[in-house]
Structures are given as C-alpha cells and as structure tokens.
Image: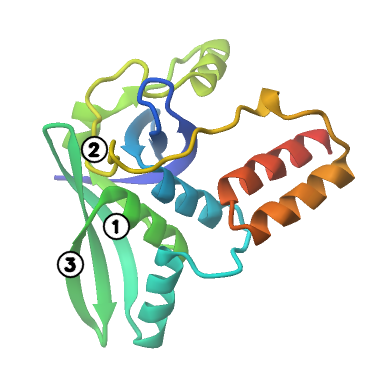
Amino acid sequence: MNLVRLTIKGISYSQTQNGAYALLLSEMDGKRQLPIVIGAFEAQSIAIALEKDIRPPRPLTHDLFKSFSDRFSIKVKQVIIHKLVDGVFYSSLICERDKIEEIIDARTSDAIALALRFKAPIFTYQNILEKAGIYLKTDEDEEDDDLDKDPLQDTELIINEDFDEDSNIEDVTPESATPKKSIQELEKDLEKAVKKEDYEEAARLRDEISKRK
C-alpha cells in the first residue's frame, strides 16, 4: 500500500462534540483532508508546536519526551497513521537509535505532537484516506466556506480514542466575547497568558494581534 504524506491544516473547536477539538490533516499532493477528534491537552500541545513564538515556561509532556529522546540520541524519523478500525485511528512512531530502527505504538494526537517537535513527516495509507478522507470543493468560494465550518460536521467516521469525554475540559471563550482592546493591551494579556501556561488563550490572543497588524 502506498503511503501518502500529510500536513497539518489546522485545529478548530468542534461544534458537534462538546469539549473536543478537530485536527485537520491534508494530503500534500491532493485535496483530501483527514479530520481527527482530539482532546484539549493534545490540541494545546500541537498548537504550541505550530506557534513558534509561544514558549511555555515549563516543558509540556511532549516537550519532555523530546528532551529525553535528545539526551539519549533517540530520533523520531516519521509518523504513520496505519490503521482505522471502528472510527479509531492507530499510529506508529518510527524511531532510530544507533542506526537501529524501532516501531512504537502511539495515539494519533500524541504522535503528531511529537512529529512537530522532531520535524518528522506524517504519513497515512491510501486506503485510510479513501475511507475517512473528505474532499475540498473545487469552487474557490465554496473552499472558503469549508475552511470556516466545523470539519467534522459532514462526517461521522472519525471518533478516535484521543478524546476522553470524562476528562476535565474548560469551555472555550468565544473571540467575540472578548472586549475590544488596544494592541498594547492584547500583548500584555498574551504575556500574562503564557506565564499562567494558558496556551489556548495565548494562541487566540496572538491570532487577534496578527489580524490587527
């Protein structure tokens, strides 16, 4: 089976599953996208890895794994989403140490969070994309509509073990509920959010600052 390389298109708050986030992966040489439901912690960890200008004062779990691996010369070479059974994705980390390759099972959200930190490529198999992928509309305006809506709205395939309904997840404050502030005030709020390790809020504030600039 042929491997297809994926890139991370984005993360959005799921409107269909309370407390869940939608991680959207896109094939590099095509229009198919793979939506995966993940929990708040994993979404936060992936968002931080994507946002180069947000650095936590203390290492998150995936940062700790990266530091540990670096110390003992372990490298994650690639991530493969290799199976989809009953709506659950199964992934593997392809690791190498002293030129010896090992395969380690991982949750998809953890695997992707680590892939970002190791700058490792992400792959899946063609049959998984055929089964669970969704297509972007070809019309440019319709494509813009697709990006704005919840990517999980039109598919029931993706349930995934990465989302634990019993976990403690705080509600996300909508951006529209935030009072209008100056850029200087937003930058101060951003600094405070990072210090408090509220990275979800920090990412939202950074996006608002970028829009205004």
User: How far is mark 3 from mark 1, CA to CA?
Assistant: 10 Å
Q: Residue 78: give x, y in percent of width and height.
A: 31, 62
- Residue at horizontal 46 percent and vertical 15 percent from the top: 138
Q: Are marks 2 and 3 in contact (CB under 8 Å)?
A: no
Q: Which of pointers 3 and 1 lies earlier in the amino acid sequence?
A: 1
Within-10-Å neighbours for mark 1: few <14, some 14–19, many 20+ = many
Q: Residue 170: give x, y in percent of width and height.
A: 48, 38
The amino acid beneath tag 1 is Val
* 100, above or below 40, in the image: below
Within-10-Å neighbours for mark 2: few <14, some 14–19, many 20+ = many
Q: Is residue 69 left or right of residue 100?
A: right
The amino acid beneath tag 3 is Ile
Q: Are marks 3 and 1 in contact (CB under 8 Å)?
A: no
Q: Residue 175: give x, y in percent of width and height.
A: 66, 28
Viewer-nearest residue: 11 or 175: 175
* Element assignment for label 1: strand
Q: Residue 63: give x, y in percent of width and height.
A: 45, 68
- Residue at horizontal 42 percent and vertical 27 percent from the top: 14
- Specify whether residue 106 is in view: yes
Q: Which of pointers 2 and 3 lies earlier in the amino acid sequence?
A: 3
User: How far is mark 2 from mark 3, CA to CA?
Assistant: 21 Å
Point out which mark residue 79 bears: 1
Q: Quadrant of the C terminus?
A: top right
* 11, above or below 54, in the image: above
Q: How many marks?
A: 3
The amino acid beneath tag 2 is Asn
